[in-house]
Amino acid sequence: AVSDMEYIKEKGTMVIGITEYAPMNFKAEDGSWTGFDTEFAEAVCAKLGIKAEFFVLSDWDQKVNELNSKAIDVVWNGMTITDELKQSMSISDPYVVNAQVIVCKAENADKYNSLDAIKDAKIAVETGSAGEECVAECANVTPVAAQTDALLEVKSGAADVCVIDITMAEAMTGAGTSYEMLTKTGSLTEEEYGIGCRLGSDTCEEINKIMDKFMADGTLDALAKKYELTLVK
């Protein structure tokens, strides 16, 4: 039987499931994909002698199904490692530190700064995300397709707050951004990002080997500095 890594190498491309999520994967001015995970994935694929092909997931909650159907080969998009996901996919070693944070309009920063403070607020979260898990006990939660949609809900006033990854919150809110009227307040969790492969896939082991080399030679340190992220050490 052909292994998963052999399957990917034979077709010459690794199809990478992503959402548009700065600073991990986002569009540059020329329309090409860029970001920490984009550059990381391209560097790994170069080592493997294959091409990185980016596939936008229309529904983040369907990422496991997309993997299993072979519509994609990996999920590489600031994916928080959870015990639940470990049951349905093989996940790489952790590589970036993350947290789930509250984002609201700057004028409400003192009002919405903890889980207790938002329990009665209108909350927007990405469906199937770690943020959704954080607010599972809250009464007024609206799941949306993407974290960017959650930000739009707050910007428009449809939601009081959203709970998203700190990496996105820091990249997309505040002065000079499209969401300059929004700010992050309290952190609800501490997490780590991993790369998702099909359950039992040997692709995961190959990615880990290359990741170890990139951690040792400074490749990932340089990327983390470029995109203002913190690596798991």
Image (spheres, rainbow, N blue to C red):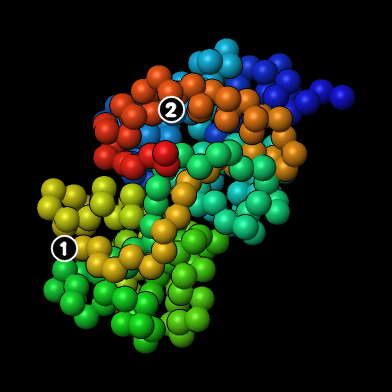
Q: Using residue 42 as the reference point, say whether residue 111 is left or right of it.
A: left
Residue 148 drawn at (x, y percent): 36, 55
Callout 2 secondary element:
helix
Give the foreground label among 2 and 1.
Answer: 2
* Callout 1 amino acid: Met
- Whether residue 155 is visible here, answered yes or no, is no
Q: Nearer the viewer, residue 159 or 114?
A: 114
Identify the residue at image location x=21%, y=52%.
178
**Is residue 224 at least partly visible in the picture?**
yes
Residue that appears at 51% across and 39% down: 76
x then y, percent, for residue 118 = 34, 80
Q: Residues within 10 Å of mark 1 (few under 14, many from 20)?
A: some
Question: Residue 116, relative to residue 84: is it above or below?
Answer: below
Looking at marks 2 and 1 on the same chain, the residue that comes earlier in the sequence is marked by 1
Q: Badge 2 local density, few (<14 within 10 Å), some, or many (20+)?
A: some
- Please tell me which residue is depicted at 47% across the width and 70% down the height of the picture: 134
On screen, 81 above or below 34? Answer: below
Asked if residue 14 lies left or right of residue 5, the reply is left
Q: Is residue 119 above or below residue 170?
A: below
Which one is in front, 168 or 91?
A: 91
Quadrant in the picture for the N terminus: top right
The picture places residue 62, in percent across and down from the top left corner, at: 62, 53
Query: What's under tag 2, amino acid-wise?
Result: Met
Q: Which residue is mark 1?
A: 181
Q: Which residue is under mark 2?
A: 215
